[in-house]
Image: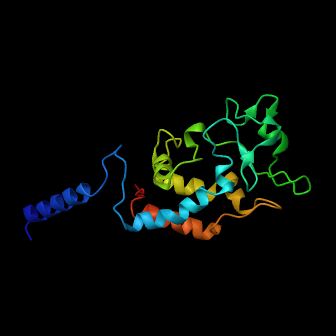
Amino acid sequence: MTRRLELWLLAAAAILWFAGSPIVGQEREAQPGGRGVDAFDPIATVLQGPRCLNCHPRGDRPKQGDDRHIHLMNVQRGTEDAGVPAMRCVTCHQTRNNDLAGIPGAPHWHLAPVSMGWDGLSKGELCRTLLDPSKNGGRGVADLVQHMTGDALVQWAWNPGRGRTLPTLSVDDFKAALEQWAAVGAPCPN
């Protein structure tokens, strides 16, 4: 094969590859029945469960319990997502669960930023929120997978303490679903 033909084939392959990739800043939308959408379904069941939604409110009041009632004691978000000055999250929520008192705990306990509020979002809206760097702290897909599988506060969901239900997937199955979704381009349901 001549050098010119090799370069032409390489250029054609690159054009075809980029034609199928989302443009930077463009939302990724999945085609019906796509493998990525199927991979996102189990992820959404975890993220839309009480362990995640209680700390991902769209307003300033966290929720608590499996029934997701408004946090008692008039707990508020505060300016740093860690409670108001007189009621910081870490005042009650220590670095580990206190099963005797029924208070959950994990390192750096705090609310997710308002931009990452998921309560009431559809699967597609949740997915697009996750992928939006202006909302997710500037994270790319690989960073999101790392955050959701390696952050101690996120991992607390699989060790929530006495009286709290676990997420719908095991931590290993959740990680596998995230990796599969990322591997197919992290598309979002409509």
Report the quarter where the N terminus lies: bottom left
Residue 132's x, y, as percent?
46, 44
Residue drawn where x is 77% and y is 43% of the image: 71
Residue 184's x, y, as percent?
39, 64
Looking at the picture, tell me which residue is in the foreground, 1 or 114: 114
Residue drawn where x is 58% and y is 62% of the image: 45
Q: How many marks?
A: 0
Residue 114's x, y, as percent?
59, 37
Can residue 93 be seen here? The reply is yes
Report the quarter where the C terminus lies: bottom left
Residue drawn where x is 43% and y is 63% of the image: 37
Residue drawn where x is 35% and y is 64% of the image: 32
Can residue 108 be seen here? The reply is no
- Asked if 144 appears above or below 5 in the picture, the reply is above
Looking at the picture, tell me which residue is in the foreground, 186 or 53: 53
Residue with the most extreme right position: 100
* Colour scheme employed for the rendering of this structure: rainbow
- Asked if 77 appears above or below 70 in the picture, the reply is above
Residue 105's x, y, as percent?
79, 51
**Residue 50 picture quarter:** bottom right
- Asked if 118 appears above or below 142 in the picture, the reply is above
* 148 relative to 158 in the view: left or right: left
* 40 relative to 20 in the view: left or right: right
- Asked if 102 appears above or below 59 in the picture, the reply is below
